[in-house]
Image: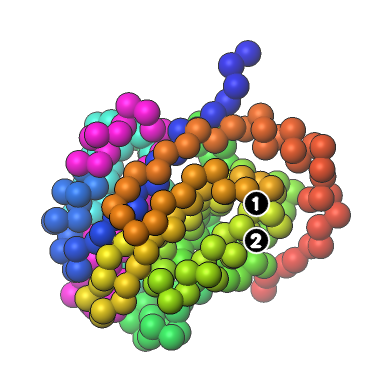
Amino acid sequence: MQELELRVSLLQLDIVWENVTENLAQVEKKIAENYQTTDLFILPEMFTTGFSMNSRVLAETNDGKTIRKIKELAQQFDVAICGSFIAEDNGDYYNRGFFITPDSENYYDKRHLFRMGDEANHFSSGNKRLIVSYKGFNISLIVCYDLRFPIWIRNVENEYDILICVANWPIVRSRAWNILLEARAIENMAYVCGVNRVGIDGNGLEYIGDSKIIDPKGIIIATSENKTDVISVNISKESLTKFRNKFPVWKDADEFKLL
C-alpha cells in the first residue's frame, strides 16, 4: 500500500505594497512553475496587499478579483491554495483566511487582531475555527497573531494533522515566531507550516521570512530566510500516525471550552 503523503509548497514572497494585480501575477508565476510537484500552495497573510490597515479601500468580497483568480489557478493546476486577504462582508472588514481546492472554498476570519498594529480599529474579529479535509489530511488554518494563543489552536483528539499559519511577522519579533511555531507543533502533535513574507512593507517594517515546516516532534524539516523562495516538502501521514500511537500525549490533554 502506497504511503499517504501531501506535497506542500510554501511561497515566501516579497509582497508589493497594496498592489493586488502585481501580487496575483507573482503568485500565478510561482504556481505555474511548481504545480507538478505540489498538492498545496501556502501564501503569506494578506498576500495581495501586505499588512495594510487600508481596509475600506482594498477590501474585496469572496467573489472579487483575488478569490476569483485563486479559484481559477486551483482548477487550472489541480491544486489547493491557501493564504489570507482583506475581505468585506455585509459592511464589515476581515483579515480573511482561505483554503481553496479545485472543487471547494473554505474561509476563516482571523480571531486575534493585532492591537499593536491597530488592526482592531480597521477589521472585525472572527469567531469560528476552520478545519478542512484534503487528500487524506485534516488541516487547520490560522492567521499570524493567532499563533500566540494556544487555547484557540488546541488540537483536541487529534482533530487536525497540519496547522497552517500565514503571516506578516516582522524581523524584530523573529525569535518569538520561531519558538511559537515549534511549540505549537510539539503541544498539538501535528505538522506546522508557517509562511511569512520577506522585504520591507509600506510602513517601513522589515521581514526576513523564516518560513518553515516543522514535524510533530518540533524538528524543522525545511526553512528559508531573507529571500523570495519556494519551500517544498512531502508530509507523511504514516509517520504522524506512528508517532501519535507510540507517544500518545494527546490522551492526557486537558479539555478546554471556549465561550
Q: Is residue 209 above or below residue 104?
A: below
Q: Which residue is mark 2?
A: 183
Q: Residue furthest top?
A: 1
Residue found at x 81% / y 50%: 249
Relative depth, front residue between 133 and 30: 30
Q: In the figure, residue 238 lies in which quadrant? A: top right
**Which residue type carries mark 2?**
Ala
Q: Earlier in the sequence, mark 1 or mark 2?
A: 2
Residue found at x 47% / y 69%: 174
Q: Which residue is mark 1?
A: 218
Q: Residues within 10 Å of mark 2 (few under 14, many from 20)?
A: some
Q: Are marks 1 and 2 in contact (CB under 8 Å)?
A: yes
Relative depth, front residue between 102 and 41: 41
Q: Residue furthest front?
A: 226
Image coords of residue 251 (percent x, y):
84, 49
Queried whether the magenta region covers residue 150, the answer comes back as no
Left or right: 184 as drawn, with respect to 59: right
Range of residues picked out in magenta: 29-58
**SS at mark 2?**
helix
Asked if residue 258 shows in the view, the reply is yes
